[in-house]
Image (cartoon, helix red, strand yellow):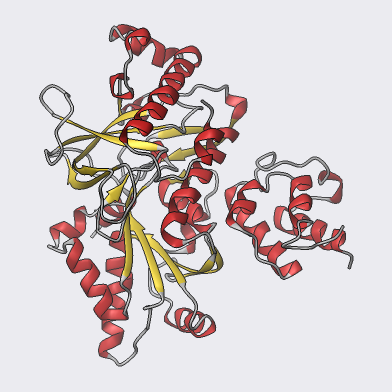
Amino acid sequence: MNFEKILEIPPFSLNEAEKGKLLTERLAELTKLHCDKCGKYRNMLEASGFDAEAVQSYKDIPFLPVRLFKKLELKSVSKDDIVKTMTSSGTTGQAVSRIYLDRTTSSNQQKAMVKIVSEYTGSGRMPMIIIDCPGVVKNRAMFSARGAGILGFSVFGTKKIYALNDDMKLDVEGLKNFLEKYEGRKILLFGFTFMIWQHFYKELLRLKEEGVVFDLSNGILIHGGGWKKLASEAVSHDEFHKRLEDACGLYDIHDYYGMVEQTGCIYMECECGHLHASNFSDVIIRRPLDFSEADIGEAGIIQVVSTIPESYPGHSLLTEDEGEVLGIDDCPCGRKGKYFKVNGRLKDAEIRGCSDTYAAKF
Amino acid sequence: MSNLEKYNAAFMECLEITEGQLAGLKYQDITAWDSVGHMGLIAALEDAFDIMFDTDDIIDFNSYEKGKEILAKDEYGVEF
């Protein structure tokens, strides 16, 4: 099954059985493709005793630890076909993952992402406020996860403004003018959780005390990159929502979970506060002791599978995050597929995520 | 300026290339036309023709020739 076929299906329309069939077919093909094209991947599978013929379900396909992309150069295309190398966010001195993309994989990432996000925002484009500094996308040779996130979402923006300058200070005048110009229009806001909190929310709060109030009740905010730092400041998900609404009227807020190793198939939070897996990908929660699949409501290590990666063997990965499946096909929001929550990083795991690595400085 | 001139000018300015490089040029053939350059090019074309691309068209826009095809569609109505 090629990826174009998967793109034609509405991203949250398949039930568990239908989606299982699609994922099994596509991921088995990807496993074979990467075995053929990537010697290191093939060696790992052979050493683990993997038997492709015995695969009944996509859940039988081995996963690679996500950390491996920091240690090994894993790719299934020749150097000449690589158009972009993406790196994970890391704190200073930390090794970063390198993900090699060819045209097809890079383009499919963007296509999948647009299909998913459109289910939340509608397909129309909006004036967009990027809650970050323009410097993030300047260094084009090294593409960070933070820059990739901003660019990926930029497709939904018409006119754009960076709300922060390169010193991470809020551009109060710029923001004021922008909001005046697009008064009454639906506005897209995008940023990383900690930056929003530290450099946007706190500044709005300070300005409010001085009598300068911004009205963002027409806004829809999409944010991601990790909660670790906010959790340590005892700012919960609900608190984050409530405080933003109090500060600027912003109430349409969606968190997302995603990683540079599987760019494109992000997991977005619905109106009920649940993260959803689309047809393009899935999460499988594994018990830490034997890697068997956990039950619904049972916390474990998050494995992610994606139908997108053709240029690198990253279609099945074990993350260092802990989460739990909340249900399948029956979220009140109407979206089919698994819905889940992320509890945080595994104990002793490295800090990662665009929000958390940045926050490590504070 | 004719529509073709406007179209070419947007490419040449955004991607810093010459007219001779336009024909057959594909997304990611040159470093300037990466995802950052692409969004800049889209914005320049939207300004030049006073239109707004659909998200799907921004993604399908993967070559100099394909862009002309997209702009010629009814919703944008740019004639070359």
On the question of residue A18 being in view, the answer is yes
Given residues A292 and A228, the one toward you in this image is A292
Q: Position of residue A46 (x, y in %)?
A: 34, 7
Q: How many marks?
A: 0
Q: Is residue B37 visible?
A: no
Whether A322 is drawn above or below A41: the answer is below
Residue A284 sits in which quadrant? top left
Q: Residue at x 36, y 42 (%)?
A: A259
Please give the name of the residue rendered at 32% of the width and 53% of the height, measured from the top-left corner. A334
In the figure, A310 relative to A198: above or below? above
Residue A219: x and y in percent read 40, 73
Which of A136/A158 is in front? A158
Please give left or right for residue A45 compared with residue A11 in the image.
left
Q: Residue at (48%, 43%) from the top-left corner?
A: A112
Please state the horizontal and vertical placement of residue A311, each as a whole percent of the image. 51, 27
Query: Which one is in front, A324 or A64?
Result: A324
Residue at figure coordinates x 62%, y 26% from the top left: A80
- Farthest residue to the bottom: give it: A211
Q: A208 left or right of A163?
A: left
Q: Position of residue A240 (x, y in %)?
A: 22, 67
Quadrant of the rendered structure where residue B23 is? top right
Relative to A228, is A134 above or below?
below
Name of the residue lying farthest toward the right: B2
Q: Quadrant of the C terminus of chain A?
A: bottom left
